[in-house]
Image (cartoon, rainbow, N blue to C red):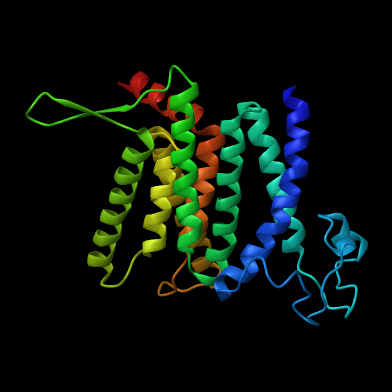
Amino acid sequence: MPVDFGAVIMFLYGLVVGSFLNVLIYRMPKEESVTTPPSRCPSCDTRLRPRDLIPLFSFLLSRTRCRYCGEKVSWRYFGVELLTGVLFAATVLINGFTWDTILECLFVAVLIAIFFIDLDHFIIPDELNLAGVVIGVARDMLKLALDPSWALARIPIPFTGAVVHAPRSLVGILVCAGLLYLIALIGTWMFKKDAMGMGDVKLAAAFGANLTLAGVLVAFFFAVGIGAVVGVLLMATRLRSREDMLPFGPFLVTGALVAMYWGPQIFNWYVNTMLLRG
């Protein structure tokens, strides 16, 4: 299948997935079922009909209001659908239309749900982190089966000269989760309060399952950098004080998306720059 046509297909598929993500984002923090009852207006509780569930178009045709009670509907619903479609299409354009790309799109969908749930509620549901880990392990196993250039990770045993081979995804899970857990412990010790939630640590495990080590470094770098800039701007504009907590999940997700689409180029540029300086 031509890549351009595959991107169009995944864009349309992404719109549908984005519509479902809106359900996840609304219901998961409330610990409600994401399948039952069928979609309803949160204001008047009227069950939505098929014509109300067409991604993008239903929102625009209803003039951003509920068709039944007239209550204003947030633009976020439209934004989540469009964002998911665009990122699905971009993933295909960058990586081609393969089974691995389809799984990567599913991971993107998980990241989008995590972004908005953590932004609103300061929590990252374990189910989403687990889904991210499972997707990463599945991608790793698929590459081992289909890609001759994809090999097990080589782990040297200190002081023995021995080498242990293990799936890259499992090594990434342990390394990334362990690293962020260590950072969380150090932050708690320094600031005398919880500096990072365990949801962020579990999210790092999902990063390790899906990204290369270089990609994880890029993701963490951008997460910390963007988080610092946003934090300073919020304090400068007095929208937040120094004592207020900021959810770190959205910054981690942003860093991961940067790493997924531009990670190799950014990492290679950094390494080459350091070599030239050396």
- Report the side of 229 relative to 169 (left or right): right
- Report the side of 221 relative to 50 (left or right): left
Viewport quadrant of the N terminus? top right
Viewport quadrant of the C terminus? top left
Image coordinates for residue 192, horizontal then vertical, percent: 25, 72
The residue lying furthest to the top in this view is 148
Q: Residue at x 50, y 38 (%)?
A: 259
Image coordinates for residue 31, horizontal then vertical, percent: 55, 74
- Report the side of 164 relative to 6 (left or right): left
Q: Quadrant of residue 51?
A: bottom right
265 over 238 or under it: above or below: above
* Residue 210 in sight: no
| Closer to us: 276 or 146 | 146
Image coordinates for residue 162, horizontal then vertical, percent: 13, 25
The residue lying furthest to the left in this view is 159
Image coordinates for residue 206, horizontal then vertical, percent: 43, 48
Q: Residue at x 67, y 40 (%)?
A: 88
- Report the side of 186 relative to 31 (left or right): left
* Residue 74 in sight: yes
105 over 131 or under it: above or below: above
Q: Residue at x 45, y 56 (%)?
A: 228
